[in-house]
Image: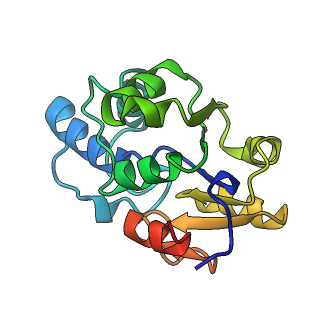
Amino acid sequence: MMNTKNHEIGFDLDGVIADTGEAFIRLACEEFNYCSFRLQDITSFQVEDCLAIPADLVAQIFHAILKDSLGTGLKPLPGAVDVITDMADKAPVTIITARPLEQPVTDWLDHFFPARTCQQINLVAMGDHDDKVRYIRDHNLKYFVDDRVETCLQLAKAELTPIVYNQPWNHDKHTLQKVHSWQEINELFNN
């Protein structure tokens, strides 16, 4: 358990709140007939480095998810809605995403989260994986949950406290604190 206040914790969206891995795998199969891989096969954040799928198709699938999260069937990870809703009842919740477009994220949040929770979410769509430190500091966060190891290492170097949301693409690639589920996030921050 960490001694912290809810307003000091921030979250990445894709791979932490949103089950982007599932959406990618499903769309690769349904739209392009690449059906032979599972989530565990995505062992690199750069999907084209670990799967036998052309880089342009990887980009096309991720672009579709970013542009129309609802239309592509992107779902929340189990427990994310409940934990964030509980946190938002106590203090604003900050989500900082490397996505460049805010509206598809806002639409997605409005669809899956209660209206009162959405009113308590500070959303930053900043468009750059490598610039989160600045936004995390701007929002006075001390802790940040992200699935991208490189981002978490940058946060640690900047003397912030990263927590890695465990995914196959970051497994065994760091020695930072990690969580495997939203239940663990809830327990870690004692909500």
In the orientation shown, which residue stands out farthest toward the right? 158
Q: Between residue 95 and residue 5, name the one nearer to us.
A: 5
Picture quadrant of residue 37: bottom left
Q: Position of residue 81 (x, y in %)?
A: 36, 48
Quarter of the rendering occupied by the N terminus:
bottom right
Q: Between residue 114 and residue 14, name the one nearer to us.
A: 114
Q: Residue at x 33, y 45 (%)?
A: 76
Q: Position of residue 62 (x, y in %)?
A: 41, 33
Q: Residue at x 77, y 67 (%)?
A: 156
Give the answer, above or below, for where 144 lies relative to 18. Answer: below
What scheme was used to colour the molecule?
rainbow
Q: Position of residue 126 (x, y in %)?
A: 67, 31
Q: Residue at x 74, y 53 (%)?
A: 141
Give the answer, above or below, for where 138 lies relative to 106. Answer: below
Picture quadrant of residue 132: top right
Give the answer, above or below, for where 120 lies relative to 187. Answer: above
